[in-house]
Every structure is written in C-alpha cells, then in structure tokens.
Image (spheres, rainbow, N blue to C red):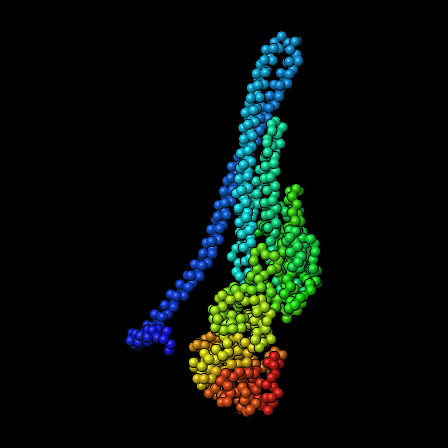
Amino acid sequence: MVTNEQFVSKLKLIDTAKLYKEKYSQNPKELIRIIKKCLESESLMAQQNNSLMEVNVKSSQEIENLEITQQMDLISNHITHTNEIRITIQSDIDSFNILYSECTKCSQHLQHMRNQRMSIPQGPEIERKLKQEKELYEGQLKTQSLSLNNALCVYINKLNESLNLLSPVQAHIIDKALIQWKREQQLAGNGYKYMKDIDVIQTWCEKLCDLIWITRSQIKEADRFRVNLGRYFELPQSCEIINTLLDMTTQYLSSLVASTFVIITQPPQVLKTNTRFVAEVRLLIGGKLNIHMTSPVVKVSIVSESQANQIIGRNKPDGESCGEILNCTGKMEYQPVQRHLSTNFRSMQLKKIKRTEKKGTESVMDEKFSILFSSKFFIGNELQFEVWNLSLPVVVIVHGNQDPHAWATVTWDNAFAEPGRVPFNVPDKVPWRNVAEALNMKFSAATGRGLSEESLTFLAEKAFRMQNVDFNHMVLSWSQFCKEPLPQRSFTFWEWFYAVMKITREHLKGPWTDGAIMGFIRKSDAEEMLTRYATGTFLLRFSDSELGGLTVAWAGSNDSDAYSLHPFSAKDLSIRNLADRLLDLPYLTKLYPDIDKNQAFGKYYTQPPNISTPVTSNGYLKPLLVTHVPGWGGPGTNGQGMNSYPNTPQNHMFHVNSPGNCSIRETSSVHSEPVNNMMAFGNDSLEMDFSSNLNDISHVDEAFF
C-alpha cells in the first residue's frame, strides 16, 4: 500500500495489527473465536437476507392471490344479488301473467254481455260492474308493467355491472399473470426458476369461467324476460342492450378459452431431426366446461417465422407447415384428481424441415421455427372454438456440432424477447448488464454456482475485446456475442463460454460449486498472483486458447516462477477426474490462497482398487492410470520434488517446457502425460524405462491407456 490514497488505510491497519498483538498475543485462540463468531453472524445475516427476499416474493404472490380472491368474491356476491333480482322479476312476471289472464277473461265476459244486452234484464248493471272490474285490472296491469319495466332495467344494469367487474379481473389474469408465467417459462430455458404456479392460475381461470358462465346465463334469462313481456308492452332499447351484453360475455369466454390453452412442457428449443421429443398442452378451464366429453383432438405441426407471423395476424392457423412431424396428434384427456384437461405427446419426431434461403452471414442455426398446437371443439352445442398456441422459438439442427451456435440463438432470444413482439424479433444490441445477467443465470443453472462480479468483468473484457473500461453502460452486439471470432482465435465468445459451461457441468460441477475453481482469470494475471504465494500454491482456470480446457497454474520454487499445465479437456477428465489428477501431482500442495489440497479435493478422490485381488475376474491385471509431468515429481518421488524414476528424462528434448531449465521464460506451459513409465499392479509398482522411446510416446493420447 504505497499510494497516497491508501496512506490513511495503511496507518489504520498498522494500528489494528498492533492492537491485536497486544491483546491476543498470549491468547490467539480468543481472536480466532471472535473472528469465527463474526463470520457466523455475517453468514446468518446473509441467510436471513436471502430468506427475506424469498419471503418478499412469496408475500407479493400471496397478496396478488388475496386481491384476486377478494375481487372474485365481490363479483360472486354481486352475481348472487343479481340472481335475487332475477327471481323477483320471475315471480312478478308470473303474477303479471295471472293478472293479465284475469283481465282478458273480464274483457271477454264484458264483450259477451254487450252482445247479449237486450236478452238479459240485468245486463246493463252487469256490464257496468264488468267494466269497473276491467278498468281495475287494467290499472293494476299498468302499474305492474311499469314496475316490471323498471325491474328489468335494474336487472340489465346489474348484468352490465357484473361484466364491468369481470373485465379487470380477466385482464389481470390473462394479460398479466399468464403473460408473466409464459415469460418466466421462456426465461426458464436460460435457467430461471419459476415463481408463478400454473395450478394457481388455473384455479383463478376456473373461478372466472364460472362467473362468466353464470353471468351469461343471467343475460339469457333477461332476454327471455324481454320476449315474454314484449307481448304485453314495449321495452325500448332493451333488446339491443341485452344482445350487446350477450356478445360481450361470449367474447370474454372466447378470450378466456383461447388464452388458457397453454403449453405446459415446451418442446426442446434446440431440436435435432430424427430425435424423439416430448411436449404437453393443457386447457386450464377444460374441466369446467366439460369439453372432455367430446374428446377434442390436438394437432401438432412446425411453422417458420413468416408462417408464425401470418397465424398471429389472422389469429387462426392456416394448416401450412414447413416440416414433417411423426406422432403429431393426440386427444385431450381429463384427470379428475388434478383437474387437468391435457394432451401429452411422448414420442414426437421431426423427420423433415424446409428452410428459407440464407443471406450474408446467416446460418441455419440463426433460423427460428415454432411448434404449433391447435384444436377445435364445441361448448354446449352452441359455441365452437378453435384454439392454438405457438411454442417458444426452436432452432433445428441435424448434427451435434451445431449445438453451440443453436444455443446462442436460443439463449439470446429467451433473454431479450419482449412480450407481444413480432415473431421472433429480438434486439441486435443489448446492454452488457442484461447480457451479464443472462450469462450468470445460464451458468448458475448448468453448474450449480453463479458468476462473481470479477468473473463477469472478465467475460465483459473478453466479449468486448478490451480491458479497464466501465462496461455497465456499454451495449454488446449479436455479432460480438457469437459471430466474430475472438482476437487471434478461431472461435467466438459464445463458443468459448459454452465450452467452459459444458466441461464444468459434466466434469467439474462439485469443485466449481465448492468454489475450488477460480476459472475466469487470465493466464498472466493468475501467474502474477501466484508469485506472491508459497511454492506449490496452485489455482484452476479456464484456458483462453482452447475450447473447454481447464489448466492448473502453480507457484514455483523461486519468487518469480509460475507455471501453467497444458489444459485438460473434457476427454482427459472423463478418463481420470480432476481431483485424482491433482492428487497425482505432489508438488501442488495448497489451493489458492492457502487451502490444503486434500481438504479442497479429498472428497472427490477415487477410492483405490482392492489391492488384495490384483487379478480381475477375467484373469487380466488392471493397470492404474496416473498423471505425470515429465521433469517434475509424481507418484513415487523422492520427497524433494524430483522424480525418482531411474531414467527420468532431463535432456534437451524437454528444454522448451522443462521448469528446471534456467533459460526458459518465467511463465512456461507444462504438458502433462499419462504415466507412461509406470503401471500399478496390486501392491507392487512395476517401473519401466521408456526414455529411449519417449519421442514416440510423448504425444500418445491418454485414452489409449
């Protein structure tokens, strides 16, 4: 700490060190106890903070659930009150019909008396009484007709209020909750953990469906009232209003049915031809409408980007397809316990695909398709629905070597697609902070541990091809991400990152999750760091020059010496795992900064074979593969770091890579070889002299052994 800015901090640290010496020099365990307690407290605070964040997420979901439930209850109470008005109107109409019938009888009797006036002596008196009775009936009918007209108007207004209450709830469920769930489902393709539960959303949709259906039935009752009363007196504008309300409920129901036809299990977004894949679709409100009684069929096809645009524009699939899918039809089946009306496609297979012509630097891995699911069915023999849904964008490949670029397309689309976009548009340039978030999410999901700020800075420097810059306000282009090769390399940034993620997931997950692999650091920076530490201190980093390579850098015997082992590939680590390879190299003693190697990697060591039975069941001796660096100590060393093999080669053939040669550069690369001159048989080690043939075997692949 030599700069002026650090001077005050330096004095404070010196004072603190003196204080520690005065207070704890006689009792260092007390200092350890205090520091341990502080670390435990900080760890507890960090856990509580993480728990608080989870609680906040759960609380927000609970609040949302409570609000929707309260709104549903409010609508339900309103519909119940509306139904009471309906019952009253029905009763009043029954009374009106009786009164009207009595009035009609009276009118007929009066007319009969008028016709028979001359033949009946009391005719005029009877006629007068009948006339008074008729006038009384007509007065009552007029009063009741006005009352019924007003009641029907109130009833229609209540129905309109019901729809006004339903509208925002449906908008929230369809346009917010379901859209958010679909967005989270897309982000899950990059490793995002779901927050919303589709079963909770299904419960909301089912309740909403019930309310809409009841309201629709009440509106149809209002129309029946209108028809019945229209025989007696005019109901101005009621017909038009009721028809409008009925159309609105049909529209609400149609929107709800169409929106709740969802893809629960998405097809793989990188889809290889002639490979089996699965998917599942569900109609969230299917159980409420008894749609399963008609056994609707779901059809599956694959469409191009332009065809997807046409489908969305017409809001209707047109039957066009750009490929052939086997086992592409299935019936919706209802599971009463889960209340799921769904179709599971368990063995679909893409046989053919028709691609569009490519322009410029476009490749087949840039082209996006979508799997289309569609179905038709009736509800109540009066409403026909045609539902469909497009899967997340799919990239079709024919060979595994197309995986990296295909996943680049998918990852970019999943991370930066905007809701309601034109399929499948994504921005060409994105702020680095968003790219960093996507990479961290992807890496964390694949390997079990996310990326530190230092690792993300390293990735930014690699992606932008520059250093010592504030990347937070910079934007990264799609071309920089996966099109342009890195400087002096034949691969792109994404290809390098993908290879690192792949080898970590498949061979290094345990040590990476433990934090034993630093990974994202330059070779020069790693070796410079190690020169300040004790001999044998090592760290693990991902190779800059080789795709999916992991190298070991360690501190040599001199303060200025640091060495890097030739990178281990996935193939190397599949033959012998990382922990065993580190165990083979005794001069690697401390994991950076000061962690015993056995403590860091001991739990990953392979248990030694049963040495009491050197001969296997088939009668052969089983050799033991051991990692050895020519010119350095290994298994069977003499304890001084030098090889005890009788003929360990130290001649000019290792001059370039030999760490013992004083003329080599400070940060040399060292190649590891399988222990070509040693095989272990049972309790004994058979030493063989291969020095005369070392030129022939120095490049033999370890897989041979």
Q: Residue at x 32, y 75 (%)?
A: 11
Residue 240 falls in image quadrant: top right
Specify whether residue 273 is in view: yes
Taking 399 as reference, is 143 left or right?
left
Taking 469 as reference, is 301 left or right?
right
Q: Residue at x 50, y 89 (%)?
A: 663
- Point out residue 512 in the picture as x, y percentages from the top left corner: 50, 71
- Point out residue 689 in the picture as x, y percentages from the top left corner: 57, 90
Location of residue 234 with respect to 581 vertically, above or below? above
Quadrant including the N terminus? bottom left
Location of residue 131 with respect to 482 vertically, above or below? above
Which residue is nearer to you in this view: 69 or 190?
Answer: 190
Specify whether residue 29 is in view: no
Which residue is nearer to you in this view: 329 or 121?
Answer: 121
Taking 655 as reference, is 323 left or right?
right
Q: Residue at x 34, y 70 (%)?
A: 34
Location of residue 498 with respect to 658 vertically, above or below? above
- Point out residue 355 in the picture as x, y percentages from the top left corner: 69, 63
Taking 324 as reference, is 161 left or right?
left
- Point out residue 554 in the picture as x, y percentages from the top left corner: 48, 81
Q: Total of numbered circles in the picture? A: 0
The residue at the far top in this view is: 121
Q: Residue at x 65, y 43 (%)?
A: 383
Quadrant including the C terminus? bottom right
Location of residue 577 with respect to 692 vertically, above or below? above
